[in-house]
Image (tube, rainbow, N blue to C red):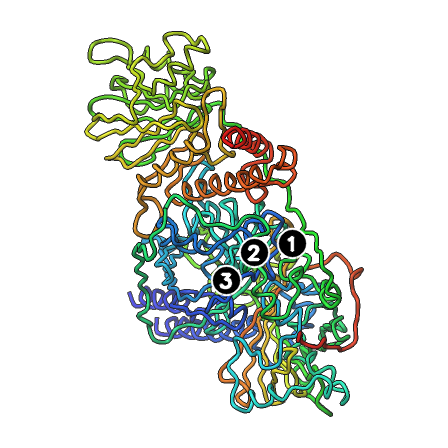
């Protein structure tokens, strides 16, 4: 009896331990790359996406006047730098791409083309400013060399709860619920079940943390972010709309104690396009603000 | 026993595995205003139409918008609707309602501090209400988890605005929301479809931070105030082309007006070229075609409880109201001839007590063709068929049309109003020359339900029957009287319910929008008549443009023609 009891306790503990490991991997938290990122993708982000500028229109479609920092709380140093903005001087110094760096590019009106460069690298091209970001799923790839406008990005999938691709969503409740999917739920594949639909749109997101970038502009009128800022992004493909529109939401958090008092949050919407027929790369160029 | 205990412990451990925080949206959340802050917080908005895919109708409405309109008492305490409320300064609380036996989430509940609005997001798969159900500022919501995204669909939303600059959102708006959580940040996406005022879906998103410490600022107390004496029957608005502040925002930021009100086209990257070139004209896109107006004559008649003792019968042409109680049954209007037996059957299902009284709100065939059937099935205390009450104009019109004597109201009144008591509540009739010269509105004071007849519709522009003595001024008088009678509940939904001649159950907010529309369109046509414009010129100027998508182009044409005729004759 005692032996059977011990065996049962050991089984429980092992089960919990295994569950915890699987749980961590299910959230993309495992070290290294267990399987190719392309295979593990819980959501398909590839394609041509167009920015729909329905928010901050005057800051994004046009160049705001110098000193217009609406909605941003800058430090004294941030204000000083922003107030010293001189577009002509930037252009003369070859710094036209300061508004097209990793901290500002997502807010530029333009198109986004996302492809797999290889099984563990997503390539994100922007026609605005003809910029390219490389999103590495392989964490062993360290940033090297000089800082660049787009910096060095490490990506990881944030799988939907209940497991990633190949795992059935687990319900939050007991019984044959049609309710929400369970928090936790046992980790990737633990409960088995049929694979998700091939469209891969049932939740899950891409988390990207970028470092090793050059100082740039949050806005076209010289509102700065520093090289020491922390930039974290989440890319979500939203469930398709009744009119068949498909949206990509990019949630960006920029923390930059040098120039910003507090975190700066934005969420930017892109709509999926059928093809690249409207893809129109342009050089980094900022129009002068209205007089 | 020990084994049972351990198994139970195992189950508890498994079930209580820590939840992923991304999925728990419960908590108190406060807005972060890093996008569109100028519009969302201080409200620096005169003439700011940027980023919204408005169509021509939306632009016309916004151009006509005079902010003094909110001085009218009926508008003063109106909250933002769902499509707008997350765009203002706000905090909200989310909690779950779970089934006690299964612990399934039945609903998410949301309390929004701004205007103290409450929402329920039903997660149990229930359907949305039918088209004739009343609308509310927060609408009716159902939700579904898509992985770690909570997707919510809301219909039955009241008309309001997308911006304080007067960009309207119609009551045909549908909102799809997505809730996404990362740590203590909740992102909220809205994709808004509005066939009346938008040419394509309007997408926006906003961030909310989890509140560590409860903020006490949850109360909103709105009291009506008349700060400046003003005639409450006059609706402030600007005639087309006469808005003195429409370019205020564009000038302030040095932007071309064409871009500022450019609609959907201006939200795409290629518009930057036009903006740089200051291209003056932008053609606003039209929206998708409106769904066809549903047939009002169904195969069956449905009884819908409105409030108190009053029910609405739908499916027999014009709406029918039925009041039931200990003393018997009272019926307001009786529908089309083909449905009269089904109308009677529906009444009998509600009550088997005798039908004592009937009221006709006008002489129209779609309101009165069941008169004989219903009347003959009823009985007054004296043993006669149920008495039909109406303004004398109804009798005159029916006589003129040679309607059978058994269909005619023989208990008529000629005074401005009449009142009597039945089933323990006071009933008031008020006469107006509106749709015809014999219109009555009927108010059930105890049930707090107002039956409008064709003075108020939610399906078309008003129909002014000129041969039957219709009058636009009389119609406005009737609508203003209705606004005097109706009182919304504290947070502006419900209170007095209104059964329109055609369309869905409404309340004061719906009536005031309809009144404002009639007033504004009349004013525009009046101005054109004064300027000597012909009917063809008036039609070409599209004085109903901002409402055509809501009430239909066909009925707009007739409305413009009749109002023009009336106002030209007055001139």
Mark 2 or mark 3, which has the lower sequence index?
A: 3
Above/below status of B103 relative to B484: below
Above/below status of A156 relative to A256: above
Identify the residue at image location x=30%, y=48%: B489
Residue B373 or residue A31, whichever sits in front: B373
Q: Chain ID for label 2?
A: B
Foreground label between 1 and 2: 2
The residue labelled by disc 1 is A245
Q: CA distance from mark 1 to mark 2?
A: 10 Å
The residue labelled by disc 2 is B191
Dot 1: what SS? loop
The residue labelled by disc 3 is B179
Dot 3: what SS? strand
Tell me, yes or no, whether the two marked residues, 1 and 2, touch with CB atoms within 8 Å: yes
Identify the residue at image location x=41%, y=33%: B500
Dot 2: what SS? strand
């Amino acid at each position: 009896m005692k032996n059977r009891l011990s065996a049962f306790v050991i089984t429980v503990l092992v089960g919990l331990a295994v569950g915890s490991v699987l749980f961590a991997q299910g959230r993309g938290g495992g070290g290294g790359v267990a399987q190719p990122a392309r295979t593990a993708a819980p959501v398909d982000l590839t394609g041509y996406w167009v920015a729909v500028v329905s928010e901050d229109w005057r800051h994004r479609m046009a160049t705001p006047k110098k000193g217009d920092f609406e909605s941003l709380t800058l430090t004294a140093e941030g204000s000083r730098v922003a107030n010293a903005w001189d577009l002509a001087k930037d252009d003369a110094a070859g710094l036209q791409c300061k508004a097209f760096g990793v901290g500002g590019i997502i807010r530029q009106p333009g198109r986004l083309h996302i492809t797999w460069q290889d099984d563990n690298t997503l390539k994100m091209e922007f026609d605005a400013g003809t910029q390219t970001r490389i999103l590495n799923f392989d964490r062993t790839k360290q940033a090297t060399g000089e800082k660049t406008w787009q910096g060095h990005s490490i990506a990881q999938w944030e799988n939907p709860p209940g497991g990633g691709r190949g795992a059935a969503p687990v319900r939050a409740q007991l019984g044959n619920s049609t309710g929400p999917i369970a928090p936790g739920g046992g980790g990737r594949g633990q409960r088995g079940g049929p694979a998700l639909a091939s469209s891969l749109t049932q939740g899950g997101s891409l988390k990207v943390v970028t470092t090793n970038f050059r100082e740039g502009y949050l806005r076209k009128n010289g509102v700065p972010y520093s090289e020491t800022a922390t930039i974290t992004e989440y890319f979500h493909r939203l469930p398709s709309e009744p009119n068949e529109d498909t949206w990509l939401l990019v949630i960006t958090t920029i923390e930059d104690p040098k120039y910003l008092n507090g975190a700066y949050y934005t969420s930017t919407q892109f709509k999926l396009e059928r093809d690249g027929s409207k893809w129109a790369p342009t050089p980094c160029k900022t129009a002068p603000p209205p007089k | 026993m020990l084994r049972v205990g351990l198994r139970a412990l195992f189950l508890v451990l498994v079930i209580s595995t820590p939840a992923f925080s991304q999925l728990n949206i419960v908590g108190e959340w406060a807005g972060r205003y890093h996008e569109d802050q100028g519009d969302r917080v201080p409200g620096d908005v005169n003439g700011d139409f940027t980023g919204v895919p408005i169509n021509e109708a939306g632009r016309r409405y916004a151009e006509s918008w005079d902010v003094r309109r909110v001085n009218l008492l009926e508008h003063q305490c109106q909250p933002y609707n769902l499509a707008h409320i997350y765009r203002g300064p706000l905090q909200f609380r989310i909690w779950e309602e779970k089934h006690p036996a299964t612990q399934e989430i039945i609903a998410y509940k949301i309390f929004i501090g701004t205007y103290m609005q409450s929402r329920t997001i039903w997660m149990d798969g229930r359907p949305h209400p039918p088209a004739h159900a009343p609308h509310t500022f927060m609408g009716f919501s159902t939700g579904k988890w898509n992985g770690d995204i909570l997707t919510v669909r809301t219909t039955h939303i009241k008309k309001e605005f997308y911006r304080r600059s007067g960009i309207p959102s119609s009551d045909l708006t549908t909102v799809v929301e997505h809730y996404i959580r990362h740590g203590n940040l909740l992102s909220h996406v809205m994709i808004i479809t509005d066939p009346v005022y938008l040419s394509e879906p309007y997408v926006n998103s906003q961030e909310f931070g989890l509140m560590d410490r409860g903020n006490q600022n949850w109360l909103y107390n709105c009291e009506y105030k008349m700060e400046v004496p003003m005639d409450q029957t006059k609706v402030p608005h600007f005639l087309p082309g006469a808005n003195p502040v429409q370019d205020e925002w564009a000038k302030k930021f040095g932007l071309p007006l064409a871009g500022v009100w450019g609609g959907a086209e201006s939200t795409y990257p290629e518009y930057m070229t036009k903006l740089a070139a200051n291209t003056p004209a932008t053609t606003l896109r039209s929206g998708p075609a409106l769904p066809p107006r549903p047939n009002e004559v169904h195969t069956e008649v449905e009884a819908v409880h409105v409030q108190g003792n009053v029910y609405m019968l739908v499916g027999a042409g014009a709406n029918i109201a039925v009041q039931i109680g200990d003393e018997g049954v009272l019926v307001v209007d009786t529908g089309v001839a083909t449905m009269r037996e089904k109308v009677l059957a529906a009444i009998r299902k509600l009550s088997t007590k005798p039908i004592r009284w009937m009221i006709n709100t006008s002489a129209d065939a779609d309101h009165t063709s069941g008169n004989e059937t219903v009347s003959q099935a009823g009985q007054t205390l004296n043993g006669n068929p149920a008495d039909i009450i109406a303004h004398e104009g109804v009798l005159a019109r029916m006589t003129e049309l040679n309607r059978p004597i058994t269909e005619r109201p023989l208990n008529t009144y000629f005074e401005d109003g009449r009142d009597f008591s039945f089933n323990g509540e006071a009933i008031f009739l008020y006469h107006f020359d509106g749709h015809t010269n014999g219109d009555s509105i009927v108010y059930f004071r105890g049930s707090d339900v107002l039956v409008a007849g064709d003075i108020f519709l939610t399906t078309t522009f008003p129909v002014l029957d000129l041969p039957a003595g219709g009058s636009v001024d009389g119609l406005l008088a009737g609508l203003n009287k209705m606004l005097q009678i109706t009182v919304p509940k504290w947070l502006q939904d419900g209170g007095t319910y209104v059964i329109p001649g055609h369309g869905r159950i409404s309340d004061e907010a719906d009536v005031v929008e309809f009144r404002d529309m009639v007033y504004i369109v009349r004013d525009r046509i009046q101005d054109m008549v004064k300027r000597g414009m012909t009917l063809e010129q008036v039609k070409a100027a599209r004085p109903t443009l901002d409402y055509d998508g809501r009430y239909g182009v066909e009925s707009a044409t007739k409305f413009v023609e009749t109002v023009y005729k009336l106002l030209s004759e007055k001139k």
